[in-house]
């Protein structure tokens, strides 16, 4: 809609800016990182100011049926806003230097590094000297492959680690959105109250849309901010259903009255039938309301406690026996993709009918496993100057890759390469941030379409000749030196004995 004709445009833009600003880390204060960033780069200022590269990698996949070790990229809009929504302020950086050098419990501040940043830019608005490359939204990728790559003054890039590791959340939400889409052709409505706060709820909804195209929600603010993405759904709650109860009337009578009044006023509803008993009193009242309102063809059922699979069949069969056309039956109660499949399979086996009228409502599922350890998000330095760097590990799968990394796709294979190499494959990384400015601009619809195109495409990961050579040489060096150290340690112990 033309903004000049849209009375909501100005308010929407104001709220969108405020929404993304909520992710900007405490006003750009330089304390928005781990303490050891200050101590490391204070100790080695020359290394801090060198050009460096860092990769963000999800080491593990989502351990849910159907994920098949795949993940979906999402979250650039909110995650990049943490450091790049607006410039830092020169006075804030100077104030941070004073606090951390002279007043904090750990008194250390990489002053030379931040002075170099300030000297490179006139005025009070300071952009971080960082470029970021990564998968665009909706791209399906595999664990162990860098999903973002950061380049710039190494110590400054290092400050980003805690914020960028938070990509685990939107990536998991997008992947869960895909799994729910695979489990049901119906959109699984997601409510508001299970989120710790409003902004995280909206961030979740955006990632869910990218991964699976889910649009339905009870979050009114999300629909106002993103009217092209989300559609609100609302119906009867228990608070209304029980508000009419008294000791001088039957529970069944008061329940029926609330159902009837809602349908009369609103014209459609998912009748909440478990206030008294979903399989007797609620069933009888719901059928009565539906029959008494033949004009209201969008009146259906909502079940959310007890044997939900059995109740879906029960309500369908009773309506069919009465000649009522199939109505939507919403089923809830901590629904997961596995639960959706179970309910639908039970319905299909019992009735012989495809469960096209069944509609899942999923709440808590979207928060299960939403923590960093699920995917083992890791932010590791991979290059300093013209030298590749790797992080070794005694645990398989925790080693990092060396080089200034990019990722390509060819057939069913993801190829991790150094940016200096010419690779005969499709480049999958795009530029997200250029010298501290977010340059990634892509609609959520485009990202959701990419998730549709790329899910199930990639099965394998391989290293380019140069990145592979880096790993071989470093591993050979490590193996030799570990053996030599073991011999030395053995000799020292024998001498002591």
Image (cartoon, grey):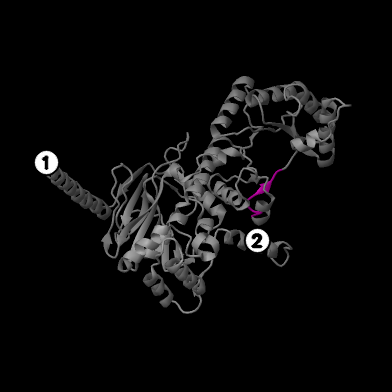
- In this picture, residue 420 sits left or right of residue 1: left
- Disc nearer the start of the sequence (1/2): 2
Task: Count neighbours of disc 1 (C-alpha within 10 A) and say few if under 14, some if 14 to 19, many if 20 or more.
Answer: few
- Residue located beneath label 2 in the image: 15
- In this picture, residue 327 sits left or right of residue 39: right
Q: Residue at x 56, y 57 (%)?
A: 443
Q: Of discs 1 and 2, which sits in the foreground?
A: 1
- For label 2, the SS is helix
Vertical relation: 100 (above or below) 398: below
Q: Is residue 62 visible?
A: yes
Please tell me which residue lies in front, 477 or 470: 477
Q: Residue at x 46, y 71 (%)?
A: 98
Disc 1 from disc 2: Cα separation: 71 Å
Vertical relation: 495 (above or below) 153: above
Query: What secondary structure predominates along the stretch shown in magenta?
Result: loop
Please tell me which residue lies in front, 51 or 303: 51
Q: Quadrant of residue 257?
A: top right
- Residue located beneath label 1 in the image: 494
């Amino acid at each position: 809609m033309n903004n000049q004709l849209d009375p909501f445009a100005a308010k929407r833009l104001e709220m969108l800016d405020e929404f993304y600003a909520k992710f900007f880390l405490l006003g750009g204060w330089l304390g928005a990182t781990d303490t050891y960033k200050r101590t490391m780069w204070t100790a080695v200022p020359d290394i801090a100011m060198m050009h460096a590269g860092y990769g963000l990698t999800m080491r593990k996949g989502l351990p849910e049926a159907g994920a098949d070790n795949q993940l979906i990229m999402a979250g650039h809009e909110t995650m990049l806003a943490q450091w790049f929504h607006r410039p830092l302020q020169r006075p804030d950086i100077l104030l941070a230097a004073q606090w951390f050098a002279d007043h904090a419990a750990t008194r250390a501040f990489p002053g030379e590094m931040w002075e170099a940043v300030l000297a490179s830019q006139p005025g009070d608005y300071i952009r971080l000297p960082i470029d970021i490359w990564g998968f665009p939204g909706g791209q399906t990728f595999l664990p162990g492959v860098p999903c973002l790559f950061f380049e710039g003054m190494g110590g400054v890039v290092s400050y980003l680690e805690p914020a960028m590791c938070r990509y685990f959340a939107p990536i998991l939400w997008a992947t869960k959105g895909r799994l729910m889409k695979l489990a049901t052709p119906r959109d699984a409505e997601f409510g508001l109250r299970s989120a710790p706060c409003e902004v995280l709820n909206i961030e979740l909804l955006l990632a869910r849309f990218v991964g699976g195209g889910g649009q339905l929600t009870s979050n009114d603010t999300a629909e106002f901010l993103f009217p092209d993405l989300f559609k609100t759904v609302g119906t009867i709650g228990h608070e209304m259903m029980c508000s009419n109860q008294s000791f001088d009337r039957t529970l069944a009578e008061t329940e029926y009255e609330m159902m009837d009044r809602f349908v009369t006023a609103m014209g459609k509803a998912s009748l909440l039938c478990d206030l008294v008993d979903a399989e007797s009193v609620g069933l009888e009242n719901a059928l009565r309301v539906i029959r008494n309102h033949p004009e209201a063809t969008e009146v259906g059922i909502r079940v959310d406690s007890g044997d939900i699979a059995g109740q879906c069949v029960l309500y369908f069969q009773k309506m069919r026996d009465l000649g009522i056309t199939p109505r939507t039956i919403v089923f809830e109660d901590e629904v997961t993709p596995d639960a959706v499949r179970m309910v639908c399979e039970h319905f299909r086996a019992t009735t012989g009918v495809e469960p096209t009228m069944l509609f899942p409502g999923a709440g808590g599922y979207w928060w299960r496993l939403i923590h960093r350890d699920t995917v083992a998000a890791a932010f590791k330095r991979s290059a300093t100057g013209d030298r590749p760097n790797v992080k070794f590990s005694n645990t398989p799968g925790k080693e990092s890759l060396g080089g200034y990394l990019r990722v390509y796709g060819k057939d069913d294979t993801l190829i991790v390469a150094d940016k200096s190499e010419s690779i005969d494959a499709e480049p999958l990384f795009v530029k997200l941030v250029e010298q501290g400015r977010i340059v990634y601009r892509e609609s959520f619809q485009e990202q959701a379409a990419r998730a549709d195109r790329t899910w199930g495409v990639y099965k394998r990961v391989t290293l380019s000749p140069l990145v592979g050579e880096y790993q071989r040489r470093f591993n050979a060096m490590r193996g030799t030196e570990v053996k030599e150290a073991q011999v030395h340690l053995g000799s020292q112990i024998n001498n002591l004995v």
